Image (cartoon, helix red, strand yellow):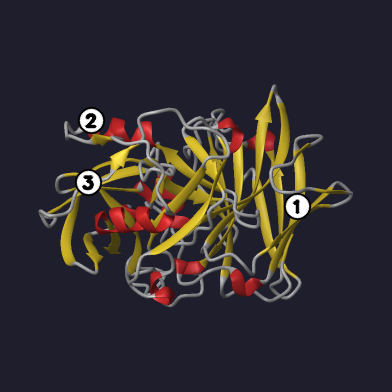
C-alpha cells in the first residue's frame, strides 16, 4: 500500500476501479461527493455525477458504514464523452454553508494499492478536490490533491463552465432551485484599484453575484463587473472611487525566485473584522501546479477572503493577484501573474501604471502607500 502525498501520482491498472472515501464522523446530512468529468483544459464536458444521485453507466456510488464512507466504482470504458481525460473527486459542504473543517479528516483509498489522507481541520473552504484521475498515453493515473474552492462546489463548477446543484438532498425545499436557504447569500473577497474607477479581483470572487459593493475605512461604493476572464481567474469591476486614491503600480521587470513579497487584503472578514490584513513571504516557485506558467507560487499565508489581493514586491509594485492555494500544504499559495492582469486592463482599453521606482520599502511603508487602493469586495446573490 502506497501512501500518496499531495502532488504525488500513481499508475492505475485496468479500466474499472473501486475507491473508498472515509471520514471519522457521520456526514450524510452535511457533506456530499461529486465526480467532475473534464477535458485537458479542465472544462466540464459531461454532467457532474453527485454521489447521492442515481447511478450512471460509468459510475456507481453508495454511502455506507453509518454515513462515514462513500464507495465509488468507476468504469472508464463507459465514459459518455471521448473528450473526458480527467475525473476530479470533490468533497463539498451542502449549500456551501460552512467550511469542511468539522469533518476532521478524509481518506481516499484503493484497497491494497494506495492511501491519501487529508487533514481537514485547517481547511476554511467548503469544497475540496481530493484527487484527480487523468489519462496519459492511453493509460490512467491518480494524482493526490488538496485543492480548495472557498465558495463551494457551485462556484467551482462555474469556473469549469457549468452549473452544479450543491444543495442537500435532505433539504425539504430542494425540489425548487433557489428556495433553499442553504446557498450562501453573501461572500467576500479583495480588490484593488488599477485604473481610475476600475478595480481588479478574481473571477471566482464575483461569479454568481447579483450585487457588488466595495468597502473600506473610506466608505462603501456600489460596483459592477466590467469583464470577467474565467480562464485566468481575473475580473475587473467598475466603481465610482474617491478621486484622491491613486491606482497601484505594476512591476515592469522580471520576477525572481525567493524574492520577498507582501500581501494586503481582507481574509476571513466575518471573523477578523473590517480591517485590512498584511502577510509576508517569498516567491517560492515561478510556476503553478503542473507547470502552469500563468501562476506564481508564494509562501505568505492566505485565507478565504484573500482572493483578489495584490501581491507586492519590495518596492510596492504589483507582481500578481492572489488566486488560490493547496490545502494541507504549508503555505503553498498561488497568484495570477501581473502580465495577465495588465492584458485584461488593456482589453478594456483602460490606462494603467508601471513601476516608477526600484527603491526597497519596509512592509509598513508598502501598507501605508497602498492600503487606500485596496478594498473588500462584498458579493450578494
* Image quarter in which the C terminus is found: bottom left
* Mark carried by residue 19: 1
Q: Nearer the viewer, mark 1 or mark 3?
A: 3
For the residue pair 34 and 379, the one nearer the viewer reads as 379
User: CB of mark 3 within 8 Å of CB of mark 2?
Assistant: no
Kindly state the secondary structure of the residue where label 1 is placed.
strand
Q: Nearer the viewer, mark 1 or mark 2?
A: 2
**Residue 22, horizontal then vertical, whole percent:** 73, 64
- What is the C-alpha distance between the residues marked 1 and 3? 50 Å
- Judged left or right of residue 158, residue 259 is right
Percent from the top left, x then y, of residue 205? 35, 54
Mark 2 highlights which residue?
347
Disc on the earlier residue, 1 or 2: 1
Q: Nearer the viewer, residue 314 or 290?
A: 314
Q: Where, by quadrant of the figure, is residue 367 drawn? A: bottom left
Give the labeled residue for mark 3: 247
> Which residue is at 28% across, 64% downward?
378
The relative height of residue 287 versus residue 314 in the rendered view (above or below) is above
For the residue labelled by badge 3, is the local secondary structure a helix, a strand or a loop? loop
User: Is residue 381 visible to us here?
Assistant: no
Residue 277 appears at what percent x and percent y? 41, 64
Q: CA distance from mark 3 to mark 2?
A: 17 Å
Residue 311's tag is none
Q: Is residue 4 visible?
A: yes
Left or right of 348, for residue 361: right
Question: Does residue 379 appear left or right of residue 110 in this picture?
Answer: left
For image coordinates 19% across by 34% down, the residue present is 348
- Marked residue nearer the N-terminal end (3 or 2): 3
Amino acid at each position: 500500500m502506497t501512501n500518496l502525498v499531495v502532488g504525488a501520482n500513481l499508475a492505475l491498472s485496468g479500466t474499472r476501479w473501486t475507491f473508498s472515501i472515509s471520514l471519522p464522523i457521520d456526514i450524510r446530512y452535511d457533506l456530499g461527493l461529486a465526480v467532475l468529468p473534464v477535458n485537458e483544459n479542465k472544462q466540464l464536458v459531461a454532467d457532474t455525477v453527485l454521489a447521492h444521485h442515481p447511478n450512471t453507466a460509468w459510475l456507481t456510488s453508495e454511502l455506507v458504514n453509518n454515513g462515514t464512507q462513500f464507495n465509488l466504482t468507476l468504469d472508464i470504458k463507459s465514459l459518455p464523452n471521448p473528450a473526458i481525460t480527467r475525473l476530479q473527486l470533490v468533497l463539498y459542504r451542502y449549500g456551501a454553508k460552512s467550511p469542511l473543517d468539522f469533518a476532521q479528516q478524509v481518506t481516499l483509498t484503493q484497497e491494497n494499492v494506495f492511501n491519501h489522507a487529508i487533514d481537514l481541520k485547517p481547511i476554511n473552504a467548503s469544497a475540496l478536490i481530493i484527487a484527480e484521475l487523468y489519462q496519459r498515453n492511453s493509460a490512467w493515473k491518480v494524482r493526490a490533491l488538496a485543492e480548495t474552492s472557498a465558495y463551494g462546489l457551485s462556484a467551482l463548477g462555474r469556473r469549469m463552465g457549468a452549473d452544479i446543484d450543491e444543495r442537500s438532498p435532505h433539504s425539504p425545499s430542494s425540489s425548487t432551485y433557489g428556495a433553499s436557504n442553504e446557498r450562501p447569500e453573501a461572500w467576500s473577497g479583495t480588490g484593488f484599484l488599477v485604473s481610475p474607477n476600475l478595480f481588479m479581483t478574481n473571477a471566482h470572487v464575483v461569479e454568481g453575484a447579483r450585487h457588488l459593493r466595495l468597502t473600506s475605512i473610506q466608505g462603501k461604493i456600489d460596483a459592477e463587473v466590467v469583464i470577467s476572464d474565467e480562464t485566468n481567474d481575473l475580473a475587473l469591476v467598475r466603481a465610482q472611487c474617491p478621486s484622491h486614491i491613486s491606482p497601484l503600480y505594476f512591476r515592469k521587470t522580471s520576477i525572481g525566485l525567493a524574492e520577498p513579497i507582501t500581501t494586503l487584503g481582507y481574509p476571513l472578514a466575518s471573523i477578523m473584522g473590517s480591517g485590512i490584513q498584511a502577510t509576508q513571504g517569498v516567491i517560492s516557485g515561478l510556476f503553478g501546479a503542473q507547470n502552469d506558467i500563468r501562476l506564481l507560487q508564494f509562501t505568505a499565508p492566505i485565507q478565504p477572503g484573500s482572493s483578489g489581493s495584490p501581491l507586492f514586491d519590495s518596492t510596492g509594485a504589483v507582481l500578481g493577484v492572489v488566486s488560490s492555494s493547496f490545502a494541507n500544504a504549508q503555505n503553498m499559495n498561488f497568484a495570477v501573474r501581473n502580465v495577465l492582469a495588465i492584458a485584461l486592463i488593456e482589453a478594456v482599453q483602460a490606462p494603467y501604471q508601471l513601476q516608477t521606482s526600484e527603491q526597497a520599502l519596509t512592509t509598513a511603508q508598502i501598507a501605508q502607500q497602498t492600503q487606500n487602493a485596496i478594498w473588500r469586495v462584498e458579493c450578494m446573490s
